Amino acid sequence: MQHISRGATHYVMHGNTAHHPIEQNPKFLDQLRYTLRSRHYSPHTRQTYCHLVKRYFHFHNVRHPAEINVFLTHLAVKEKASASTQNQALSALLFLYRHVLEARGHPGPLQCLS
């Protein structure tokens, strides 16, 4: 087992694979980046998802948002975002809730999309 650092995040190496960060409670955006990278998402997709997730939380005044639909409606109506951008925002938020926050024990507002 080998410990390596990349930026401010430390990883544990098992063979040639970097596993979960050593930090007890990494910031959720760091965890999002790590999870996207570990699932082999392209660098451009990782960057876009992180940007959209930041916009989502800033839209909700950096509080844990109550639902996704309000943000998606805002993108469509107020910002006149393209259908492609709206779909990518939805995909980014679903990924965040399904693979990052839910894995950390945070329930997500996915009921409104079922």
Image: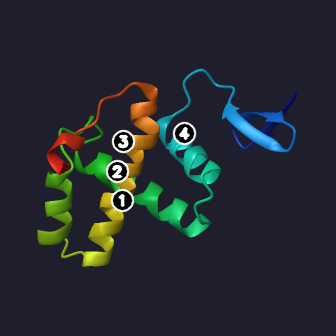
Q: Position of residue 102 (x, y in %)?
A: 39, 33
Q: Residue at x 56, y 45 (%)?
A: 35
Label 4, label 3: how many angstroms apart (C-alpha)? 12 Å
Residue identifier under label 1: 91
Q: Amino acid at mark 1?
A: Ser
Q: Where 113 sits versus 21, above or below?
A: below
Q: Amino acid at mark 3?
A: Tyr
Q: Disc 4 or disc 3, which is closer to the eye?
A: 3
Residue identifier under label 2: 94
Label 2, label 3: how many angstroms apart (C-alpha)? 5 Å
Label 1, label 4: how many angstroms apart (C-alpha)? 17 Å
Within-10-Å neighbours for mark 2: few <14, some 14–19, many 20+: some
Q: Residue at x 22, y 44 (%)?
A: 60
Tags 1 and 4 touching, CB below 8 Å: no
Q: Amino acid at mark 4?
A: Gln
Q: Amino acid at mark 2?
A: Leu
